[in-house]
Image: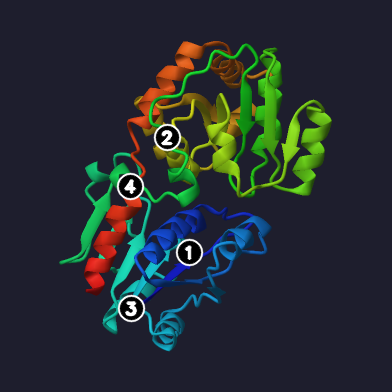
């Protein structure tokens, strides 16, 4: 049984679609399925490694209905998963029309993709009234979050607690940090004046140079497959709202979050309403360190760095929100379509 996953990654589009598809691929292979990726990772070395180390083949991903139908037929796929904001909206329906079941991974609206099964793994997605085709099934909410083996293996049994006088801090902003968040947030972390052991992920050589000049005492590293281990070992994590949010919650991280682009706002707002992380605001509002928004972010970061009790509260709420078994439920539903 061979299943295809049609998704892309890139320096500006990020790697979130790829990461959640990799998690599903790991689960499907554990059930005996063969998995093939169809798409383009835009030359992002980290994304290429994510597939290579798992032995997951990457083939060109047709962007037209006719091209995708031909690829599905040539590969003999038993099912197709699509996860893309930009894919021609007629693609899923065209594959479905030849009798191959289709699952569409979406964030909110279906973007016109006509599928048999929809997955919206976002917080409170189950509360939204989203119209899907007659007979289609919609899986929605954090019960269905797709998380990689590396994350699930590190999920703690109990909320994390740290009383370190000099907390360890990890700052990362997606696989590429396309909007240059790392220097902005590093500057605000330094502005707290609180001693800490800081590790920052640099999404590009240019960002690395900027970070090394800004924080010579910090450990500046390239994007890494070992991010879950770094999260698990850190007292505080500073990150952007997005796909990685659910990994942070599953790992019980005490996190401070920014939102970078418009499509992150809803997820950010819902996380803040439930007090699952510390809110740092909109990235573009934080660029000017003298702004009131930057001042509020520094105050929140100071609280994260100096209050073990606050960190423990965040960890407990996070851990209770994502159980790590979402991909099992999704795979059950997808395989049921095939059988």
Find the distance from the CA under tag 4 to the CA under tag 2: 13 Å
In the picture shown, does residue 212 fall above or below 301?
Answer: below
Distance between mark 4 and mark 3 Cα atoms: 24 Å
Quick one: label 3 or label 2, which is nearer the N terminus? Answer: 3
| In this rendering, position of residue 54 left or right of residue 118 | right
Task: Identify the image quadrant of residue 288.
Answer: top right
Residue shown at 47% from the left, 44% from the top? 151
Q: Secondary structure at mark 2?
A: helix
Pointer 1 residue: 86
- Spatial CA distance of label 1 from label 3 is 24 Å
Identify the disc placed on residue 104.
none
What residue appears at the point 69 percent right and 27 percent down from the top-left corner?
198
Camera-nearest label, 1 or 3: 3
Look at mark 3 in the image and give the residue it sits on: 78
Residue 66 percent across, percent down from the top left: 42, 85
Q: Nearer the viewer, mark 1 or mark 4?
A: 4
């Amino acid at each position: 049984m061979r299943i295809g996953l049609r998704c892309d990654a890139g320096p500006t589009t990020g790697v979130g679609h790829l990461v959640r598809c990799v998690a599903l691929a790991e689960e499907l292979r554990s059930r005996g399925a063969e998995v093939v990726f169809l798409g383009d990772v835009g030359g992002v070395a980290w994304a290429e490694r994510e597939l290579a180390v798992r032995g997951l083949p990457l083939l060109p991903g047709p962007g037209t209905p006719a091209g995708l139908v031909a690829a599905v037929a040539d590969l003999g796929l038993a099912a197709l998963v699509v996860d893309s904001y930009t894919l021609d909206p007629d693609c899923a329906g065209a594959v479905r029309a030849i009798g191959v079941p289709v699952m569409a991974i979406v964030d909110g609206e279906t973007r016109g993709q006509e599928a048999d099964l929809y997955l919206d793994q976002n917080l409170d997605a189950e509360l939204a009234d989203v119209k899907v085709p007659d007979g289609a099934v919609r899986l929605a909410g954090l019960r269905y979050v797709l998380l990689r083996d590396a994350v699930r293996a590190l999920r703690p049994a109990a909320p994390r607690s740290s009383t370190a006088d000099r907390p360890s801090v990890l700052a990362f902003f997606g696989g590429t940090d396309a909007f240059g968040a790392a220097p902005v947030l590093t500057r605000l972390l330094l502005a707290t004046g609180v001693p800490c052991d800081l590790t920052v992920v640099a999404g590009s050589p240019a960002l690395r140079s900027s970070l090394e000049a800004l924080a010579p005492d910090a450990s500046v590293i390239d994007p890494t497959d070992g991010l879950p281990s770094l999260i698990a070992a850190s007292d505080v994590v500073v990150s952007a709202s997005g796909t990685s949010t659910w990994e942070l919650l599953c790992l019980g991280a005490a996190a401070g979050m920014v939102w970078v682009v418009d499509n992150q706002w809803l997820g950010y707002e819902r996380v803040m309403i439930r007090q699952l992380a510390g809110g740092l605001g909109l990235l573009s509002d934080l660029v000017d360190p003298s702004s009131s928004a930057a001042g509020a972010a520094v105050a929140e970061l100071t609280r994260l760095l100096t209050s073990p009790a606050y960190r423990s509260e965040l960890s407990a709420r996070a851990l209770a929100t994502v159980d790590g078994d979402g991909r099992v439920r999704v795979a059950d539903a997808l395989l049921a379509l095939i059988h």
